[in-house]
Amino acid sequence: MEKLMSLGEFIVDKQDDFKYAKGELSRLLSAIGLAARVVNREVNKAGLMKDILGDVGGKNVQGETQKKLDVYADEEFIRALKDRGEVCGLASEEKEGVIEFKSGYAVDGQYVVAIDPLDGSSNIDVNVSIGTIFSIYRRTSESGPATFDDFMQKGTEQVAAGYVIYGSSTMLVYTTGNGVNGFTLDPSIGAFFLSHPDMTIPKDGKIYSINEGNYVHFPTGVKQYLKYCQVEDAPTNRPYTSRYIGSAVADFHRNLIKGGIYIYPTTTASPNGKLRLLYEANPFAFLMEQAGGLATDGFGRILEIQPTSLHQRTPLFIGSENMVKKAMSLMEEHSPRS
Ligand code: AHM
Ligand code: MG
């Protein structure tokens, strides 16, 4: 039988690949793993809270006030990262501005983290997979708490990124720029174990994922690509299959494993797309490129977009290389960037 490798062992094993101080990133990733386990415990109780113990936001039978899960997850990740000394600040989907960490250590934290603590939160109430997405950078400021400018780095500067999926099992998937590895939580022990080493996405896939309810508002290039996906063509395995969960982490995870494309384009209602660059598109793009796929805004690499605000949005075309290339060629032909 093969030896089980825990997340902790794996991180320590691979820390020589990391070009900055050994141990720093290990401690940071371990902190994320710990918060993920705490959030996982609450996510698993979500149905209990709502249907049996009283509605979230109200009081449970012990008279404790229940927090909404996304607020809870936000607090847990802040708590896990705050007191460790590696991180000098956070940008979270749940907070307007930079969350500054003042360090009590001789040397201030060298990293900043952008995080979506609980993505796909509209799926919580219906027992569908949700996730956490994170992106880690070296700070650009010298010392003290993080500044706004520390977060205005292109995705190419990420030193690590990943996600946690709270699904039929709970997994943590991350990259530090040397491939992508996935770990599954063994709930009986409370530890993540390496289950998906060196994850790669097939060059071609059969799955397309998009909220087709917005069809009338899509650019013509996207409409043309959908038509392409739906046409019968035996040599290219078409028609493709449509799968859309509405939790970006779950849609991303499935497509990464099986091959496919996820598109959240511009729409007339959201002229810049819906997803956020810093804590959704960039970490996904880093992971996807590391897995051998592509991530673009329909025209150019996500990782090369210069951010100008914390909660900036971007269209996203991400997945199997040949599928993304095809979608981009139809965008170029029918909806060129103005
Ligand atoms: P959220 O961060 O508010 O949860 O929104 C992001 C989510 C993604 O998980 C998902 O892919 C997308 O929004 C779904 O949007 P829509 O309901 O418009 O299809
Ligand atoms: Mg989100």
Image (cartoon, rainbow, N blue to C red):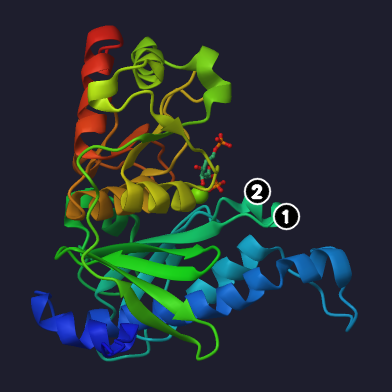
Q: Is residue 120 above or below residue 162?
A: above
Q: Is residue 158 left or right of residue 186?
A: left
Instruction: Give the distance between the C-alpha atoms of the residues marked 1 and 2, in whole angstroms.
Output: 7 Å
Q: Does the closest atom of ligand 1 sit within 8 Å of the Cβ of label 2?
A: yes
Instruction: State the SS at label 1.
Output: helix
The picture quadrant where one finds residue 137 is bottom left
Residue 147 at x, y = what percent?
Answer: 33, 61
Q: Amino acid at mark 1?
A: Asp
Residue 141 at x, y = what percent?
Answer: 22, 65
For label 1, the crowd category at 10 Å Cα-Cα, with few meaning under 14, some 14 to 19 and many 20 or more, is few
Residue 228 versus residue 146: which sits nearer the camera?
A: 228
Image point (54%, 43%), residue name: 245
Reading the image, the residue beneath label 1 is 125
Image point (37%, 46%), residue name: 255
Instruction: State the SS at label 2.
Output: helix
Q: Are marks 1 and 2 in contact (CB under 8 Å)?
A: yes
For label 2, the crowd category at 10 Å Cα-Cα, with few meaning under 14, some 14 to 19 and many 20 or more, is few
The picture quadrant where one finds residue 297 is top left
Residue 260 versus residue 138: which sits nearer the camera?
A: 260
